Image (tube, rainbow, N blue to C red):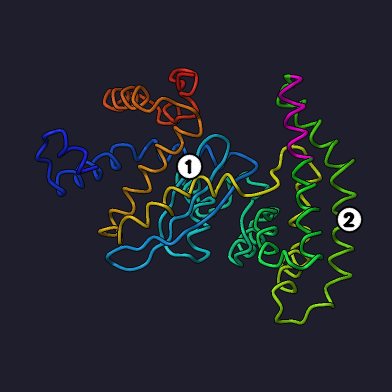
């Protein structure tokens, strides 16, 4: 960004740009908190995390996606950080000590990291696991006919999803009708395929020794089988965690272009900035018009941050088609 400014003839310094990012994060902090609260009122979220090197040591950036918004949270990689991302902010805003008291989450989609299992069990949240991750474990073993068959069967599950989406789009179904159609397709088509896949995995498991890659891929599925099949019981749950991976991918790619974030404070500003702009992208909000509106509204001192989130402003500032 600094090179872009200098190419336009500006003599902007690094410190000036950093200060602008800090002030932007501080100014938009109430809107970021409002996005957090709105995500936590939903029944379902995607979660993912990725390392974030800083000059002060390694941190982790957590992404929580819900509806058409995403929250970024920076901290360690333990359960305390996930608990904070999943409810502490709501409890603090309500003046309660119990971080889960006001959370309404019922389902959480994430990878197989053990912290997700522990925290969802504490909160009584139903865990979902990602079929893209499961498939990925079999790809290095495609020379084995069994692995090829498993990959093909997972592909059949995704075809059911694509056909349901195509039908809903072609028939212009309402969201409720689309969910009902997808639920029926999953019960009638995916559930039998899942039962067959489970039987096949159980039958072939003993063919591979404990240290074999295919044995690990099979166990990854069987140990978490219930988490992998919950999606097929409803029409409103996703089959994978691709939404969270898409949200966090710019950070992963960007990490190749810089060594570290300069300070722990800077990670907090970055999290707020990413929250605002990624939520604009998800809600298909035109960011420049949106920012002008929010800045003016916050300066007025009378605006409710809950009404200034990208989700709430989507109809006023849509991305031009």
In this rendered view, identify the residue nearer to me: 301 or 207.
207
What residue sits 54% from the left and 50% below the top?
Answer: 245
Q: Earlier in the sequence, mark 1 or mark 2?
A: 1
What residue sits 61% from the left and 55% below the top?
Answer: 110
What residue sits 85% from the left and 58% below the top?
Answer: 197
Q: Which residues are magenta?
A: 160-171
Real-space Cα separation, disc 1 to disc 2, in angstroms:
38 Å
Left-right relation of 103 to 31: right
Left-right relation of 179 to 41: right
Q: Position of residue 36 (x, y in %)?
A: 48, 42
Which residue, given by chain and number where applicable, does mark 1 sit on?
36
- Work out which residue is located at the far front of the displayed protein and give it: 143
Which residue, given by chain and number where applicable, does mark 2 sit on?
195
**Mark 1 burial class by Cα count in 10 Å: few <14, some 14-19, many 20+:** many
Instruction: Indicate yes or no whether the magenta region holds residue 167.
Output: yes
Q: Position of residue 264 (x, y in %)?
A: 30, 59
């Amino acid at each position: 960004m600094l090179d872009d400014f200098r190419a336009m003839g500006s003599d902007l310094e690094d410190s000036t740009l950093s200060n602008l990012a800090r002030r932007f994060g501080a100014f938009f902090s109430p809107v970021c908190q409002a996005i957090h609260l709105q995500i936590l009122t939903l029944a379902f979220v995607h979660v993912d995390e990725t390392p974030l090197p800083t000059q002060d040591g390694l941190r982790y950036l957590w992404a929580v996606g819900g509806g058409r918004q995403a929250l970024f949270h920076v901290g360690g990689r333990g359960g305390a950080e996930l608990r904070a991302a999943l409810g502490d902010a709501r409890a603090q805003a309500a003046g309660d000590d119990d971080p889960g008291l006001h959370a309404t989450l019922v389902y959480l989609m994430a990878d197989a990291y053990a912290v997700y299992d522990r925290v969802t069990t504490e909160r009584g949240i139903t865990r979902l696991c990602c079929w893209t991750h499961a498939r990925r474990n079999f790809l290095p073993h495609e020379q084995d006919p069994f692995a090829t068959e498993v990959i093909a069967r997972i592909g059949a599950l995704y075809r059911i999803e694509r056909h349901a989406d195509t039908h809903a789009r072609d028939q212009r179904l309402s969201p409720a009708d689309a969910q009902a159609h997808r639920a029926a397709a999953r019960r009638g088509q995916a559930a039998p395929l899942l039962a067959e896949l489970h039987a096949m995995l159980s039958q072939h498991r003993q063919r591979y020794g404990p240290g074999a890659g295919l044995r690990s891929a099979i166990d990854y599925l069987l140990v978490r089988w219930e988490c992998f099949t919950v999606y097929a019981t409803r029409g409103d749950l996703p089959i994978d965690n691709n939404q969270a991976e898409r949200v966090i991918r710019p950070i992963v790619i960007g990490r190749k272009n810089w060594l570290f974030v300069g300070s722990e404070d800077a990670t907090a500003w970055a999290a707020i900035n990413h929250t605002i702009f990624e939520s604009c992208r998800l809600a298909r909000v035109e960011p420049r018009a949106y920012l002008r509106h929010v800045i003016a509204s916050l300066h007025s001192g009378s605006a409710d941050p809950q009404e200034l989130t990208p989700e709430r402003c989507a109809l006023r500032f849509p991305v031009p088609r």
